[in-house]
Image (cartoon, rainbow, N blue to C red):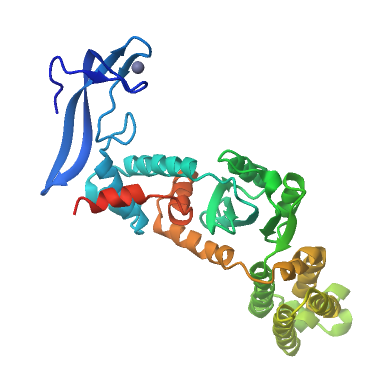
Amino acid sequence: MAHRKGQAAECPVCHRKRGTYDTRERTWRHLDIWQYETIVHCAVPRADCPEDGVHACRMPWEVRPSSHFTALFEAQVIVMALSGMAVTAIAHLVHETDARIWRLLGKAVAEARDAAGYSDVVRVGIDDTARRRGQSCISIMADLDGQRVIAVTEGRDKGAVGRLCGELEGHGGDRTKVQEVTRDMAEACSLGVAAEMPQAVQTVDRFHVVQLLNRAIDHVRCAKKRRQLAGTKYVWLQGKESLTERQLAKREELDPAKTHLRTARACQMGEALQDVYSCAGRESAARALDRLCSWMMHSNVREMKTVARTLRKEREGILNWWKRGSTNSFLEGLNSVVQSVRSAARGFRSIAYFRTMIFLRLGRLDFTAQKKLACATH
Ligand SMILES: [Zn+2]
């Protein structure tokens, strides 16, 4: 592309035709023509505007100033990423570096989020997920009515809720308008919500309650094997009368018949929780939940006692679930999608990449312009 001598240059600020100050050579990566890598070269004129000063003209094929790609190329990459292709695969296919593709996607996501606006958000869900096994956690805030992820931050400490609220407000939302927060049973999260959004009703989602109990049941079930591995031979070899009180307790715990009984009892408690959730109203659910908790507390299963303590502490939040009366399938499904995003991007070195991917897949952002543009090339 070339700029003809004497041709007027449009000022990018006031959009009036102005004289040309000078030109500067730039290049853009475009879609391949046949099998050949295609690069647009252009001496971009700078408009000499008496009101706004000297500014480089905007070229019709560029999405934003200083982009390395043409709009068509960018649209194609976004459509590929939306379809679920991994960034490394896209980069390999279009012969660009991963870092450049990530930067392109990051900018496109940021622009789409600015355009989205979260002013109508009144019901949110907060959940956390591990970025990689043994690594730091990511906290996610979702708009439950819009079924979209609206904020992502690192960590799940007490401050994480504050950072999520900050991000919400950075995009036109208002934390004081939030009426309901659905969350898990992490203490940091409940404290954070109470501090940042005191007006909101806190609800513990059914999914998290069931998960807590199921994990405890698994724990009871596996305990048998783990205890055998612990190497406590002396407990069996010595006579009962020479054992200390702790050793006696250990022997009791290791008794195969009793282990079996504990597992069976834990499973029954799991079924009792299902009965709690099949209650029609809050009143009957409260009674069933209290019954279950006291059964757990009086059982001889240590893991179940811990669960009961958590359930008692979160009683109000758990019972608030009956006010709405429906489970939040979006929040429930969120975790598995996030896990798949995580495994699809094995090379995540930065949280910024993970955020970009989550918003791309779960942000419900408007990419119709890019989709149209990508279709126009066929
Ligand atoms: Zn101007």
Q: Residue at x 77, y 80 (%)?
A: 253
Q: Quadrant of ligand 1?
A: top left
Q: Is residue 88 visible?
A: no
Q: Residue at x 23, y 47 (%)?
A: 94
Residue 204 in picture, x, y percent from top left = 71, 64
Q: Residue at x 31, y 33 (%)?
A: 67
Which residue is nearer to you in this view: 78 or 132?
A: 78
Which residue is nearer to you in this view: 4 or 228?
A: 4
Where on the picture, by quarter, is residue 260?
Answer: bottom right
Using the image, determine if residue 50 lies above or below residue 243. above
Using the image, determine if residue 269 lies above or below residue 329. below
Residue 76 in picture, x, y percent from top left = 27, 49
Q: Is residue 257 visible?
A: yes
In screen coordinates, is 197 left or right of 339? Answer: right
Question: In the rendered picture of this protein, how many numbered marks are placed on residues?
Answer: 0
In screen coordinates, is 278 left or right of 59? Answer: right
Using the image, determine if residue 371 lies above or below residue 231. above
Q: Quadrant of the C terminus?
A: bottom left
Which residue is nearer to you in this view: 51 or 189?
A: 51
